[in-house]
Amino acid sequence: MSDAPSRSSWVAPALFAVVAGCATYTIAMRHGFVGLWYLPVARAWVFGRKPAGVAMSWYGRTGDVFVAALLGAALGRTVGRPSARLMKLGGFVAGVALIVAMTTCIATNVDR
């Protein structure tokens, strides 16, 4: 027997992390992003809604999604050993969340 953790010990946290990260990204993109912005011309950081002028939201958005994914993984660790049926459902939900997040990303960047 191996001392390696079983698959079910990391699948639930991974699925929770994917869903939480995708939900955070989708909400931030569809409803406006209040977060950390980098102003490359001024070489300054601003927190809040999109400032006037050239501003980059990538750093703040990535940080928000990363924190949400960590919280989702922590929540997923609290789940006991999920059944195979529940893991399949979680995989489906995570897949739908990924598709929605990718569609949101494409839709918001096509307009530019």
Image (cartoon, rainbow, N blue to C red):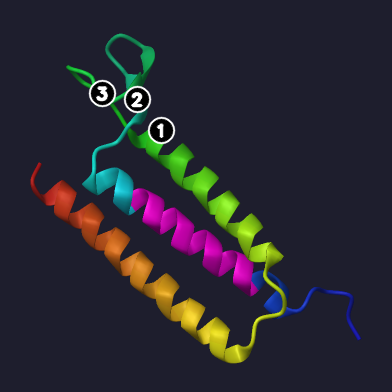
Q: Does the CB distance between marks 2 and 1 fall below 8 Å? A: yes
The picture places residue 59, in percent across and down from the top left corner, at 41, 33
Q: Amino acid at mark 2?
A: Trp
Extreme residue in the left direction? 111
State which region is magenta. 11-25
Q: Is residue 103 magenta?
A: no
Characterize the local packing of mark 1: few (<14), some (14-19) or many (20 or more) Cα atoms within 10 angstroms: some
The residue singled out by tag 3 in the image is: 55
Q: Which mark is residue 7?
A: none
**Which mark sits nearer the N-terminus, 2 or 3?**
2
Which amino acid, by three-letter code, is at mark 3?
A: Ala
Distance from Cα at disc 2 to Cα at disc 3: 6 Å
**In 3D space, how far apart are the residues under numbered discs 2 and 1 (Cα atoms)?**
6 Å
Quick check: 34 above or below 105? above
> Label 1 belongs to which residue?
60
Q: Which residue is mark 2?
A: 37
Kindly give the residue lying farthest to the bottom in the view shown. 85
Q: Earlier in the sequence, mark 1 or mark 3?
A: 3
